[in-house]
């Protein structure tokens, strides 16, 4: 697990948008090899989606060969309902409907006489038969498999540690299924509805097992109400009462948090989990707080700027951008230096013939 902390929510949203763009570009999707992007709804992703739309407009990224697949949907809301996630995605994420997949809140082919899920009014809602929903969930799992799996799954986190709509107590092996929403979650989401009684009591959600199957995961957490969940997910043991803690078992997770959402983490945690950018991400993002960066900056050669720093528990990768150095000539190429903490282990330029020294950290 890697941690990226940004002072403001704007910077955190920017970082997630940058990471998504970087991953899609690095994948170079084509008509025959699409990039599968898992996406959330809620308040968290809205700014990141705006940034992605701006970057798309500016020609920095194309979603032409991207398939999006959403994490969850409310049970009982038709796709025309303004709070359905179908409407949310149409409003916030500009991708043709033919490239978008969202679980159906109302089953497309209801099964007559199937067991019904209780409606929020306590009665039986005959429009939401359980078996039909289960069939939709099974079809969604098959769809993900047929797409070749999810390349990058972007998620928020609930104040109770849920991911998707996997509430505390969800099995780590769970697959896409019907879930009952926790009262705290319905309270939190009532801000999007006229009143809490209108918030559905159930949802369809990718399971924790489904989420763990994604090739890479990025979680965005912003605001002080996410502080406890982030602290429990990152610093405490893996426990089903904090579903996000299961991400500790995933090989490629980045948690991007703003100052408030990360405020309950120990300094030691921030240091261990990479207070700058993950080693493999390469999105050119800089963290504002790491003391390593100040030490690196103080030691850069004249005419160079720090383009990128990544660090893992053992290594720090520094990329110097010397393109603005008029005297550099061939030396204007970026220099990549791999340092072991406390010592220089290895150094080389991108083209291998221009070694450049930086002091150990
Ligand atoms: P929020 O919800 O983005 O509306 O805060 C996040 C979540 O519940 O996963």
Image: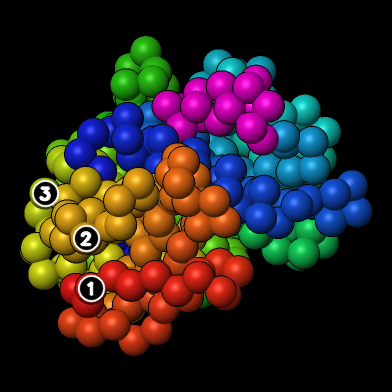
Magenta stretch contains residue 54: yes
N-terminal label among 3 and 2: 3
**Distance between mark 2 and mark 1 Cα atoms:** 7 Å
Q: Looking at the image, is 83 positioned above or below residue 116?
A: above
Mark 3 vs mark 2: in front: 2
Q: Are marks 3 and 1 in contact (CB under 8 Å)?
A: no
**Distance between mark 3 and mark 1 Cα atoms:** 31 Å
Secondary element at image label 1: loop
Q: Are marks 3 and 2 in contact (CB under 8 Å)?
A: no
Which residue is tagged 2?
A: 299
Q: Looking at the image, is 109 positioned above or below residue 139?
A: above
For label 3, the crowd category at 10 Å Cα-Cα, with few meaning under 14, some 14 to 19 and many 20 or more, is some
Mark seen at residue 263: 3
Q: Residue at x 45, y 66 (%)?
A: 336
Residue sitting nearer the eye, 137 or 360: 360
Instruction: Measuring from the top left, give residue 250's x and y in whole percent.
Output: 45, 73
Q: Residue at x 66, y 35 (%)?
A: 61
Image quarter of residue 54? top right
Image quarter of residue 226? top left
Instruction: Measuring from the top left, give residue 46's x and y in whole percent.
Output: 45, 27
Q: Residue at x 60, y 69 (%)?
A: 351
Q: Looking at the image, is 266 positioned above or below residue 315?
A: above
N-terminal label among 2 and 1: 2
Mark 3 vs mark 1: in front: 1
Which residue is tagged 1?
A: 359
Q: Is residue 354 left or right of residue 345?
A: right
Secondary element at image label 2: loop
Residue sitting nearer the eye, 26 or 1: 26
């Amino acid at each position: 697990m890697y941690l990226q902390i940004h002072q403001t929510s704007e910077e955190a949203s920017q970082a997630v948008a940058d990471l998504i763009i970087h991953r899609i570009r690095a994948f170079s999707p084509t008509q025959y090899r699409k990039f599968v992007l898992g996406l959330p709804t809620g308040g968290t992703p809205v700014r990141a989606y705006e940034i992605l739309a701006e970057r798309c407009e500016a020609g920095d990224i194309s979603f032409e060969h991207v398939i999006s697949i959403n994490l969850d949907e409310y049970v009982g809301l038709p796709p025309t309902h303004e709070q359905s996630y179908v409407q949310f995605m149409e409003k916030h994420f500009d991708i043709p409907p033919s490239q978008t997949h969202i679980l159906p809140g109302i089953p497309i082919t209801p099964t007559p006489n199937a067991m019904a899920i209780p409606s929020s009014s306590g009665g039986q809602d005959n429009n939401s038969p359980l078996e039909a929903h289960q069939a939709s969930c099974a079809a969604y799992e098959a769809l993900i498999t047929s797409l070749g799996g999810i390349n990058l799954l972007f998620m928020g986190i609930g104040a109770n540690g849920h991911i998707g709509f996997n509430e505390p107590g969800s099995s780590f092996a769970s697959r896409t299924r019907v879930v009952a929403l926790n009262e705290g979650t319905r309270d939190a989401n009532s801000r999007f509805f006229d009143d809490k009684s209108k918030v559905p009591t159930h949802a369809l959600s990718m399971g924790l097992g489904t989420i763990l199957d994604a090739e890479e995961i990025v979680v965005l957490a912003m605001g002080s109400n996410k502080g406890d969940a982030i602290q429990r997910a990152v610093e405490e043991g893996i426990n089903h009462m904090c579903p996000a803690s299961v991400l500790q078992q995933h090989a490629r997770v980045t948690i991007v948090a703003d100052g408030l959402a990360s405020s309950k983490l120990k300094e030691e945690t921030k240091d261990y989990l990479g207070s700058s950018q993950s080693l493999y991400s390469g999105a050119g993002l800089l963290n504002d707080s790491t003391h390593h960066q100040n030490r690196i900056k103080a030691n850069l050669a004249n005419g160079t700027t720090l383009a990128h720093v990544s660090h893992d528990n053992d290594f720090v990768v520094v990329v110097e951008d010397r393109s603005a150095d008029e005297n550099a000539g061939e030396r204007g190429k970026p220099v990549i230096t791999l340092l072991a903490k406390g010592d220089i282990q290895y150094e080389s330029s991108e083209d291998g013939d221009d070694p450049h020294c930086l002091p150990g950290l």
